[in-house]
Image (cartoon, rainbow, N blue to C red):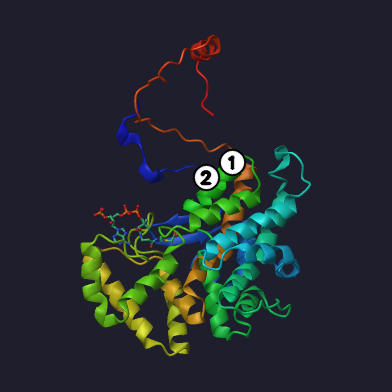
Amino acid sequence: MTDTTDIKKGLAGVVADVTAISKVNPETNSLLYRGYPVQELAATQPFEAVAHLLWTGELPDAVALADLRATEREHRALADEVRAVIDLVPLDAHPMDEVRTAVSLLGAQDLAGSGSVLAASGSAEDNLRRSIRLFAALPAIVAYGQRRRRGQEMVAPRDDLDYAANFLWMTFGEEADDLVVDAFNRSMILYAEHSFNASTFTARVIASTLSDLYSAVVGAVGALKGPLHGGANEAVLHVFDEIGEAANVSPWLDDALENKRKIMGFGHRVYKRGDSRVPTMKAALDTLIEHYERPDVAELYDALESEFVARKGIYPNLDYPSGPAYALMGFDTLTFTPLFVAARVTGWTAHVMEQFGANALIRPLSEYVGPAERHVEGYVPDAADVEVAERPEEAAG
Ligand code: CMC
């Protein structure tokens, strides 16, 4: 029997594998993508370049960036069949269900005719192509989701706009201000990758069975939907709506803490003294607050942060500034987690490719605590059962 002190509930503190994609260092409060500090990337790079970095290990030169952008443009438009399957999802279902369904269809279409499951994992070239396809297709899926919930028509992509500007165009049907495009681009970069978080680990578990990249991403979308993970950016806005204004923070917090509520947008499994991505996203939020002339948002944000940190010593995570930033840009609260998908698909797919490159089936053990062995009344074992029971030790499947 395992000593229960050896069990790492939630796999907390367990190093499950090596990765060359990103490094989270809670001691120095830094996050590196392939060695580059994420705040440097957010300040200097378009999201397409960061996607290239995560997938290949290097930032693209001008030719590689132009190539990636050309391929991205080829896959931008929402295919009729994908639109049709999105339209089948009830309007009052969560948009993450829509995204999960759309990714699943994209996978089935791309893998049609691929034959036996033995070939599902594909070659490195196949998987880079599949990653770019998903990266390019997700903005239209997310944008159309928000528009159909608002009763608006789909907006076709524009070839003269790069990824971030085109994403905003397809969502709102008008060209966004440069400052807004920049804040949005930064948010995509900050959300792109974060080592073995729950959704990425889910993707790696699925890839480790030598299933396909699309299936891994569908699973990751499901994991990201939860409010303890990606759903937190949406939950932050629900909290802001509940509180209403800065003056209500103290009584609201008294009540929430008395009822042992988790305050969304605060706390992190890895960072205990603050999330390294927050200052960059907070700076982007500040520019949006000024641009949209919304000092009330800053007041509520600051009041909740300072009072919660003073009372609990728990700091904001990336979802805390990104939630109100997306709201100011005009995104509906329900669209926030799908935006996280559009960003994190780069990290997920980089991890799937890394997993395929040095695979070991992910299959941990568990400590059984259920009833001791017992038998169905009246059952008489036959010879085959006895034979199996007497077989020498075998690995569990
Ligand atoms: N509000 C209130 N109490 C909290 C919070 C919070 N946001 N976060 C942690 N705590 C308390 C928790 O109640 C516990 O207290 P006690 O020891 O008295 O029971 C203690 O701090 C440790 O919490 P934990 O849940 O065991 O810590 P964890 O490392 O398992 O949880 C977390 C990390 C992110 C799940 C948690 O902080 C949380 O639920 N936060 C709110 C949801 C959220 O913002 N999630 C987004 C995470 S960052 C984006 C991402 O990576 O997806």
Question: In this figure, which residue is indicated by the disc labeled 2?
Answer: 18
Relative to 209, 251 lies left or right: left
Outermost residue toward the top in this view:
383
Q: Position of residue 355 (x, y in %)?
A: 60, 45
Q: Position of residue 378 (x, y in %)?
A: 42, 15
Mark 2 or mark 1: name the one nearer the start of the chain: 2
- The answer to whether residue 57 is seen in the rendering is no
Q: Residues within 10 Å of mark 2 (few under 14, many from 20)?
A: few
Label 1 sits on what residue type? Ser
- Quadrant position of residue 34: bottom right
Query: What kind of element bears circle 1?
Result: helix
Outermost residue toward the bottom in this view:
293
Picture residue at 42% right of the left edge, 56% below the top? 25
Above or below: residue 169 compared with residue 219:
below
Above or below: residue 5 compared with residue 66:
above
Foreground residue among 149 and 390:
149
Q: Which quadrant of the render holds ligand 1?
A: bottom left
Which of the labelled discs sits on residue 245, or is there none?
none
Question: In this figure, which residue is indicated by the disc labeled 1?
Answer: 208
For the C terminus, the quadrant is: top right
Query: What kind of element bears circle 2?
Result: loop
Foreground residue among 351 and 42:
351
Foreground residue among 368 and 60:
368
Q: Which one is closest to the eye, mark 2 or mark 1?
A: 1
Distance in Å between CA atoms under marks 2 and 1: 14 Å
- The answer to whether residue 167 is seen in the rendering is yes
Label 2 sits on what residue type? Val
Above or below: residue 72 compared with residue 359:
below
